[in-house]
Amino acid sequence: MKVSIIKIGGNLIENEAVLDKVLQNFAALNGAKILVHGGGKLATQLSEKLQIETQMVDGRRITNKETLDVITMVYGGLVSKNIVAKLQANGCNALGMSGADLNSITSVKRPVKTHDFGFVGDVTQVNGSMYSLLLNNNITPVCCAISHDGNGQLFNTNADTIASEIAIALANTFDVELYYCFEKKGVLRSIEDENSVITEINTQSYKQLLNENVIADGMLPKLHNCFNALEKQVSKVYIGSIDMLSAENQLKTTITL
């Protein structure tokens, strides 16, 4: 059985009209599927209203106790339930989950090296059998970017990594395809040119693109997760806009080994 795992970025979540289109495309996708989402921009906006300072280091959020509370409210509550309700309206029987639900994703606190990121978790295990149970019963998991340690502690966890780790956990049982959807058509050679999509990136061309500084910032961990998934038997990995789910010849970036 084929399973499609789709991760949607923050810019697709915060615009109601865009999110509606994203979820229509997702719901129309044939076969078993899983949606993974973050919600960082909305969490930042709520933090500002609550006068909680947002601290970022190298594009990554430092998560203290107050920030973790906001993330749990936004990711696990507001964003998750809004997405689930919209999917139900589109005929997709969805279940909103954090990593604590059904003990689906466990993690450990990120080790302190140059910075202490606080309540940020690195994934240690994905409960693949639990996802299989849901998928085999035509239930679509909607996974937010929160994991837990098994001892009652929640962790803010990178949504790209969660998508990759779920894909890896299911790759032995299913034919898994992983899609990273965001507002661009793919990985761009030039940020100024929306159509400068690099249609394929493999391990060799990736090194060259790094040397040319074409790939930087938030795209670095995303591509790390892409290659990690492919090395662990995930069959296909793509980066692009949500249109790549519905249009066969849609411009996108295909990641290969």
Image: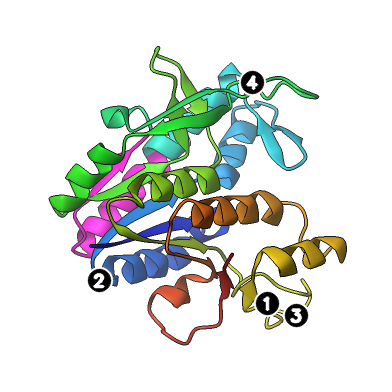
Mark sitting earlier along the chain (4/2): 2
Look at the picture and state if 160 lies above or below 26: above
Question: Is residue 94 shown above or below 70?
Answer: below
Residue indicated by mark 4: 118
Residue located at (37% from left, 34% from top): 98
Q: Which residues are magenta?
A: 78-98
Q: Is residue 93 magenta?
A: yes
Where is the C terminus found, in terms of image quarters?
A: bottom right
Residue pointed to by mark 1:
198
- The secondary structure type at the circle numbered 4 is loop
Q: Is residue 145 magenta?
A: no
* Residue found 62% across the figure and 39% down from its top: 44
Q: Residue at x 15, y 55 (%)?
A: 138
- Binning the other alpha carbons within 10 Å of mark 1 as few (below 14), some (14 to 19) or many (20 upward) gives some
In the picture, measured across the screen, residue 252 lies left or right of residue 48, that is left
| Within-10-Å neighbours for mark 3: few <14, some 14–19, many 20+ | few
Give the residue type at disc 2.
Asn
151 to 21, vertically: above or below? above
Q: Which residue is mark 3?
A: 193
The percent coordinates of residue 142 (x first, y second) are 33, 47
Q: Amino acid at mark 4?
A: Gly
3D distance between C-alphas at marks 4 and 3: 37 Å
| Front-most of residues 165 and 52 | 165
Work out which quarter of the rendered image holds the N terminus and state it.
bottom left
